[in-house]
């Protein structure tokens, strides 16, 4: 008993010391990014333990320095690592997102769930970009050409100056947060969201929320990027207010959970998701996943779960432009009066 007490005390002091030391910082650089893919065979750039906190620096999808400067961005406002990564990283594709990671979480194994607690999100630059190009977006035939726009950001007032008389509140979030997909998927394109999460583009996942992702590979291999200062549901022209973000994440491994599709939780709601090339199929998935959540976690009958989803749950289009479209169902926590 004495030995146990001393061990427990030592562990407690170690945990306090780790907390006082602050989160580990993972900068964006040529050796710490994966350009365009999630992959079960990727080599981790950082290994941490369940419970650890990591600050992760990420790039935008706005492109190289020359493109930004041509759009009117001052050279001093572009992070130095942007040019370095574009110059030095040659292993690219099949997708286009530059993701920081992978981060391995030692305890994570296939069959577990990785909880990603999003503790803080910092906007690193005073601008965002938006644009569409030929053949892309939800209405490619209506806009058979390309346009790009630099959007000034007021980070003190948390407003985007979109146009004269048009100001948009900033709600920064990461468009892409995911883990390695099953090994059979190979080097998986960073664009379509799937059971590994990835490019889900869910604007609900701001600071103070959590994403729950099924683990498919040892270590989980978490990657993050595609920073957004804000977005409309649908993301119809294929981009949001794209920008450079640094996120602070806490990783928690839940052993032997066997979740099939990602879920999320905000301070006020539970969120289920569905992804498919077909919008109807994605919607069916999100609704079924919500019903399953209500049955397994809230202990409702299947019939009651279906009816509750109809009367209290909002079913929203997440995005329409990433190969697999996304739908999410939002269940308010406040309806569960016993828990409240």
Image: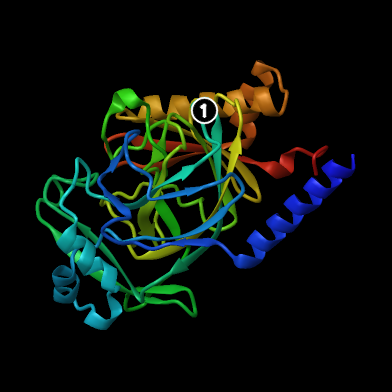
Residue 57 higher or lower than 309, as above or below: below
Q: What residue sits right under mark 1 in the picture?
A: 287
Frontmost residue, 161 versus 4: 4
Of 32 and 280, which appears nearest the observer? 32
Residue 161 visible to the viewer: yes
Q: Is residue 169 visible?
A: no
92 and 41: which is toward the camera = 41
Tell whether 255 sits left or right of 106.
Answer: right
Q: Which residue in the rendered view is the most extreme toward the front?
A: 3
Give x and y (percent) for residue 144: 10, 51
Residue 90: percent from the left, percent from the top? Answer: 15, 52
Residue drawn where x is 38% and y is 45% of the image: 44
Tell me which residue sits at (33%, 57%) in the image.
240
- The answer to whether residue 93 is above or below residue 255 is below
Say few, some or many: other residues with alpha carbon within 10 Å of mark 1 (under 14 / 14 to 19 / 20 or more).
many
Q: Position of residue 18 (x, y in %)?
A: 64, 60
């Amino acid at each position: 008993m004495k030995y146990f007490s001393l061990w427990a005390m030592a562990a407690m002091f170690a945990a306090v010391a780790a907390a006082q030391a602050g989160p580990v910082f993972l900068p964006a650089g040529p050796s710490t990014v994966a350009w365009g893919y999630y992959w079960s065979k990727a080599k981790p750039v950082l290994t941490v333990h369940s419970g650890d906190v990591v600050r992760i620096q990420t790039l935008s999808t706005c492109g190289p320095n020359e493109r930004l400067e041509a759009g009117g961005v001052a050279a001093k406002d572009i992070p130095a690592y942007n040019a370095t990564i574009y110059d030095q990283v040659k292993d690219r594709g099949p997708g286009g997102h530059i993701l920081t990671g992978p981060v391995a979480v030692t305890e994570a194994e296939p069959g577990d769930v990785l909880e990603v607690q999003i503790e803080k999100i910092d906007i690193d630059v005073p601008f965002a970009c938006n644009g569409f190009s030929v053949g892309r977006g939800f209405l490619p035939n209506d806009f058979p050409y390309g346009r790009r726009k630099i959007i000034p950001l007021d980070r003190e007032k948390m407003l985007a100056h979109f146009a004269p008389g048009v100001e948009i509140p900033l709600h920064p979030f990461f468009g892409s947060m995911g883990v390695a997909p099953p090994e059979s998927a190979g080097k998986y394109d960073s664009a379509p969201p799937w059971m590994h999460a990835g490019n889900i583009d869910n604007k609900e996942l701001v600071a103070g929320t959590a994403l729950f992702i099924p683990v498919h590979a040892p270590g989980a291999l978490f990657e993050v990027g595609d920073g957004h200062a804000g977005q409309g549901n649908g993301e119809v022209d294929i981009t949001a207010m794209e920008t450079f973000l640094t996120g602070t994440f806490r990783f928690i491994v839940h052993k032997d959970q066997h979740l099939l599709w990602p879920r999320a939780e905000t301070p006020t709601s539970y969120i289920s998701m569905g992804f498919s090339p077909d919008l109807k199929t994605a919607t069916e998935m999100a609704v079924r996943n919500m019903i399953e959540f209500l049955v397994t976690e809230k202990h409702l009958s299947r019939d009651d779960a279906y009816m509750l989803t109809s009367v209290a749950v909002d079913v929203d289009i997440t995005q329409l432009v990433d190969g697999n479209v996304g739908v999410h169902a939002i269940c308010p926590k406040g309806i569960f009066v016993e828990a409240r």
